[in-house]
Image (cartoon, helix red, strand yellow):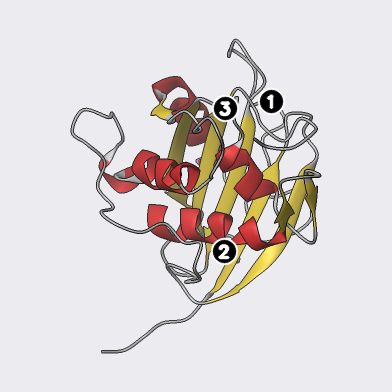
Amino acid sequence: MQRIWGLLVIAACDSGGAGIDAPAGSGDGPGGGTDAPAGAIDASPGVGEPPEMMGMTLLHNQVRAMVQTATPLPALTWDPSLAATAKAWVEMCRDTMAPTGLVDHNAGRSTGHPYQVGENIYASGGTATPMGAVTSWANEKANYNPTTGGCNGTCGHYTQIVWRTTLKVGCALHRCNGLTYPSTVVCNYGPSGNSGGPAY
């Protein structure tokens, strides 16, 4: 079997529109590591995810379930309106800001929603998948200090996934052939996380 390698790039953005953008390493698909989601990748029937995003909600909830607190984090639910915002944005393939080669953050993503919307972006030179995206974001757990809410490196993607007051997620996948990292997953979150203090 021939293996094709490419560069993965991920980006996270808080509710204020400022982003955290960083290269994530090489290889397509799961990044491995002990904090990666495990188990089945298919979501329960009726979740509402499009076929290319099947399992995205479940993968997010597996990461949230790994957080050990006195009160468990509530499970996220799939939100079609957040998914529509993500889809409309990623299909524009807009790349006008640094870092170049991947889709920019959507500064207007909260428009039309009853709350501020957070955003994670994952891009690959190969084929982006829900498992690859969530695994990359979850692997930032090692950089996060839950006591202080601080990061030692990049952790904004992980904290958006596990932010206690975030209850909804909606994502989209699109291939932007003119970009260095064309296969892109955009996930929108409501209400937004990364708004100050510890995530949970």
Query: Does residue 82 appear left or right of residue 195 in this picture?
Result: left
Residue 175 lies, in percent from the top left, at 45, 54
Which disc is residue 166 wearing?
3
| Label 3 vs label 1, nearer the camera | 3
Query: Does residue 48 appear left or right of residue 5 in this picture?
Result: left
Taking the spot 52% from the left edge, 39% from the top edge, the residue there is 187
In depth, the one of 148 and 109 nearer the eye is 148
Q: Image quadrant of residue 22? A: bottom right
Of the two numbered discs 3 and 2 on the same chain, state the one appearing first in sequence. 3
Tell me the kind of residue under disc 3.
Thr
Which disc is residue 181 wearing?
2
Tell me the kind of residue under disc 2.
Tyr
Residue 14 lies, in percent from the top left, at 73, 36
Is residue 38 visible in the rendered image? The answer is yes
Is residue 92 visible in the rendered image? The answer is no
Query: Does residue 137 appear left or right of residue 154 in this picture?
Result: left
**Label 2 secondary element:** loop
In depth, the one of 114 and 44 nearer the eye is 44
* Pointer 3 local density, CA inside 10 Å: few below 14, some 14–19, many at least 20: many
Q: Are marks 3 and 2 in contact (CB under 8 Å)?
A: no
Of the two numbered discs 1 and 2 on the same chain, state the one appearing first in sequence. 1
* Pointer 2 local density, CA inside 10 Å: few below 14, some 14–19, many at least 20: many
Taking the spot 42% from the left edge, 24% from the top edge, the residue there is 79
**Label 3 secondary element:** loop
Q: Are marks 1 and 2 in contact (CB under 8 Å)?
A: no
Measure the C-alpha gap from mark 3 to mark 1.
18 Å
In depth, the one of 3 and 176 nearer the eye is 3
Measure the C-alpha gap from mark 1 to mark 2.
22 Å
